[in-house]
C-alpha cells in the first residue's frame, strides 16, 4: 500500500516536472500573442499624423524612429505607467456598420498615453477614463479598419510580438552627471522591465524608469564606451549589448546595436 502510493506520487511529480519543463521551453524568451479581447477605438490627429509625434513614450519623430503612422495612444489601464510603451497590438473593427469588411486587422505600436478626462462621462467622450480599455489610434491607422466618420468603434484586439527591422536603439539625453536613455525599436514583447548601464571603468549600474520608454542613471559616465543590459518586461529575456556607444558619446545622439529581442 505504502509503496504503491509512493510510486503514484513519484509518477505524479515526474509528470508535473515534465509538463513544467515543456511549458517553460514554449515561453522561454519568446512572446506569444494574447487572446482576442473587446475594447473600443477612436482616432486623434489628422491624415498626416503630425499630432501623434512626440507622444508620452518619448519616441519623438515617429517617421525618423521607424514607427510611422501605425501607432496608438493607450488608455492608462493599458499604458501601465509607460511600461506598455513599444508594445504591439492587432486591432480589428468589430460589429459596427462603420467597419471595413474584408479587413482582418491592422497592427499598431503603443507610442502615447490617452489620458483620462474626468469632466467627461466614461461612456460619452471620456473614453480613456479607467477602467476602460481604449485605443486612440493615429488617424491613418484607424482609417485602415473603419470609416473615420464613425468617431468611435468597438474593436477586438490582441497583444502580438513586435516585428522590427534591425536592432535596439538607444537615444541619449541628460548631462555629465545624469544619463537619460530612450530605448527604441524593441522587437518581441516590445517592452522593457529593467535596464543597466556599464562604462568601461564602472560595474553594472541599475537604471531607474523615468517615463515612457526612458531609463536613467545618475552617474558620471563621460569618456567611456557604454554597454547596456536590458530585460524584457513580457518575456524576462535579457540582452547584453556591449560597447553600444563609443568613448566620445554625446547626448542628443542615438546609438544602435544589431541585437534585439525575439
Ligand atoms: C475634457 O473635457 C472637457 C469637456 O468636453 C473639455 O472642455 C476639455 O478640453 C477636455 N480636457 C482635455 C485635457 O482634453
Image (cartoon, helix red, strand yellow):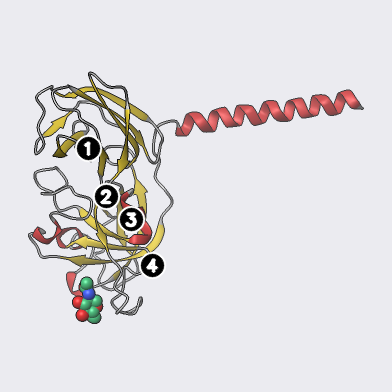
Question: In front: mark 2 or mark 3?
Answer: 2
Q: Which tag, 1 or 4, sits closer to the chain's start?
A: 4
In terms of secondary structure, where does tag 2 sit? loop
In terms of secondary structure, where does tag 3 sit? helix
- In percent of width and height, residue 33 lies at 39, 45
Q: Are marks 1 and 4 in contact (CB under 8 Å)?
A: no
- Residue 164 is tagged as 1
Dot 1: few (<14), some (14–19), or many (≥20) neighbours within 10 Å?
some
**In this view of the protein, which residue sits in the foreground, 86 or 22?**
86
Q: Is residue 230 left or right of residue 145?
A: right
Return the residue at label 3: 79
Return the residue at label 4: 130
Q: Quadrant of residue 79?
A: bottom left
Q: Which tag, 1 or 2, sits closer to the chain's start?
A: 1
Gap between marks 2 and 3, in whole Å? 11 Å
Is residue 190 in view? Answer: no
Q: Is residue 64 above or below residue 37?
A: above
- In percent of width and height, residue 199 lies at 23, 23
Q: Which tag, 1 or 3, sits closer to the chain's start?
A: 3
- Residue 211 is tagged as 2
Q: Is residue 76 left or right of residue 201?
A: right
Q: Residue at x 28, y 49 (%)?
A: 85
Gap between marks 4 and 2, in whole Å? 19 Å
Gap between marks 1 and 2, in whole Å? 22 Å
Gap between marks 1 and 4, in whole Å? 30 Å
Find out if the beta carbon at label 2 lies less than 8 Å from the nearest ligand 1 atom. no
Question: In front: mark 1 or mark 2?
Answer: 2
Q: Which tag, 4 or 2, sits closer to the chain's start?
A: 4
Question: In front: mark 1 or mark 3?
Answer: 3
Amino acid at each position: 500500500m505504502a509503496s504503491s502510493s509512493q510510486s503514484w506520487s513519484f509518477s505524479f511529480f515526474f509528470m508535473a516536472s515534465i509538463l513544467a519543463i515543456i511549458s517553460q521551453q514554449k515561453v522561454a524568451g519568446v512572446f506569444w500573442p494574447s487572446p482576442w479581447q473587446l475594447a473600443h477605438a477612436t482616432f486623434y490627429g489628422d491624415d498626416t499624423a503630425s499630432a501623434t509625434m512626440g507622444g508620452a513614450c518619448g519616441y519623438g519623430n515617429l517617421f525618423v524612429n521607424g514607427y510611422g503612422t501605425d501607432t496608438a495612444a493607450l488608455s492608462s489601464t493599458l499604458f501601465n505607467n509607460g511600461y506598455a510603451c513599444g508594445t504591439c497590438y492587432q486591432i480589428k473593427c468589430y460589429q459596427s456598420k462603420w467597419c471595413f469588411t474584408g479587413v482582418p486587422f491592422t497592427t499598431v505600436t503603443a507610442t502615447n498615453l490617452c489620458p483620462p478626462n474626468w469632466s467627461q462621462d466614461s461612456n460619452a467622450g471620456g473614453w480613456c477614463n479607467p477602467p476602460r480599455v481604449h485605443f486612440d489610434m493615429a488617424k491613418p491607422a484607424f482609417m485602415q479598419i473603419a470609416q473615420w466618420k464613425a468617431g468611435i468603434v468597438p474593436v477586438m484586439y490582441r497583444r502580438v510580438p513586435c516585428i522590427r527591422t534591425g536592432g535596439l536603439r538607444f537615444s541619449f539625453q541628460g548631462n555629465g552627471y545624469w544619463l537619460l536613455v530612450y530605448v527604441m525599436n524593441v522587437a518581441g514583447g516590445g517592452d522593457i522591465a529593467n535596464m543597466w548601464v556599464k562604462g568601461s571603468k564602472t560595474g553594472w549600474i541599475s537604471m531607474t524608469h523615468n517615463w515612457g520608454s526612458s531609463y536613467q542613471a545618475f552617474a558620471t559616465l563621460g569618456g567611456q564606451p557604454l554597454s547596456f543590459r536590458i530585460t524584457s518586461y513580457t518575456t524576462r529575456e535579457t540582452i547584453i549589448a556591449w560597447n553600444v556607444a563609443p568613448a566620445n558619446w554625446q547626448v542628443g545622439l542615438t546609438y544602435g546595436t544589431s541585437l534585439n529581442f525575439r
